[in-house]
Image (spheres, rainbow, N blue to C red):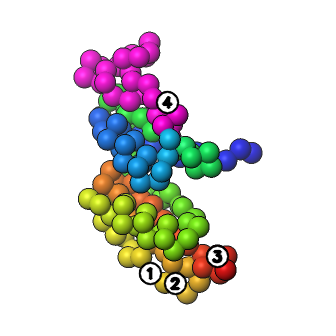
């Protein structure tokens, strides 16, 4: 099986989210397409919405799009887990995701030997950040 790639759905703010995630996770934008770029039925107000966006650094992939209709976007019942490679990385991501977001679980040392946090970002998506310290040594 190939790696699983999260595909996040928004309604009207996928461009803003793509810019945020591109910066936060140091990703490259591998391509975007608006609804007006293709032959896909959509309401006129969704013409400039993103139909598809692929962000990646070669290892971490994230895809996102706007739903052309309200009510199809959702952020509940899923958390995206990131295994961080350093103390610096977990601290940086925590701070960036907290910008206009909220801590569900503050960044802290855990009994399982990790530095861990759970953050809901400004778009409503939940990110689990884990830096397993014993693997870094």
Q: CA distance from mark 1 to mark 4?
A: 36 Å
Marks 2 and 1 close (CB-CB < 8 Å): yes
Q: Is residue 119 magenta?
A: no
86 w.r.t. 99: above or below: below
Reading the chain from its start, which is encountered first: label 1 or label 4? 4
Reading the chain from its start, which is encountered first: label 2 or label 4? 4
Tell me the mark number nearer the camera, choosing from 2 and 4.
Answer: 4
Q: CA distance from mark 2 to mark 3?
A: 15 Å
Residue at the spot 26% in from the left edge and 59% down from the top edge = 100
As helix, strand or loop, the secondary structure at mark 1 comes to: strand
Tell me the mark number nearer the camera, choosing from 2 and 3.
Answer: 3
As helix, strand or loop, the secondary structure at mark 3 comes to: helix
Question: Which residue is identified by label 3?
Answer: 136
As helix, strand or loop, the secondary structure at mark 4 comes to: strand
Question: Which residue is identified by label 4?
Answer: 31
Question: Which is more toward the observer, 19 or 113?
Answer: 19
Q: CA distance from mark 1 to mark 3?
A: 17 Å
Question: Which residue is identified by label 2?
Answer: 110
Q: Which mark is residue 51?
A: none
Marks 1 and 4 close (CB-CB < 8 Å): no
Residue 46 figure quarter: top left
Reading the chain from its start, which is encountered first: label 2 or label 3? 2
Q: Can you name the residue that lies furthest to the bottom here?
A: 111
Q: Which residues are magenta?
A: 29-55
- Quick one: label 4, few (<14), some, or many (20+) residues within 10 Å? few
Question: Which residue is identified by label 1?
Answer: 108
Residue 66 figure quarter: top left
- Quick one: label 3, few (<14), some, or many (20+) residues within 10 Å? few
Residue 114 figure quarter: bottom right
Residue at the spot 31% in from the left edge and 20% down from the top edge = 47
Tell me the mark number nearer the camera, choosing from 1 and 3.
Answer: 3
Marks 2 and 3 close (CB-CB < 8 Å): no
């Amino acid at each position: 099986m190939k790696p699983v790639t999260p595909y996040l759905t928004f309604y009207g703010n996928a461009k803003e989210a793509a810019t945020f995630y591109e910066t936060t996770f140091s990703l490259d934008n591998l391509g975007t397409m608006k609804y007006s770029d293709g032959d896909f039925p959509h309401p006129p107000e969704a013409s400039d919405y993103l139909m598809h966006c692929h962000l990646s650094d070669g290892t971490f992939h994230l895809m996102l799009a706007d739903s052309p209709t309200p009510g199809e976007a959702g952020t509940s019942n899923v958390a995206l887990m990131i295994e961080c490679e350093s103390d610096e990385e977990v601290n940086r991501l925590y701070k960036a995701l907290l910008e206009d977001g909220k801590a569900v679980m503050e960044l802290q040392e855990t009994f399982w030997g990790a530095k861990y946090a759970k953050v809901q970002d400004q778009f409503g998506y939940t990110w689990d950040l884990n830096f397993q310290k014993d693997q870094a040594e």
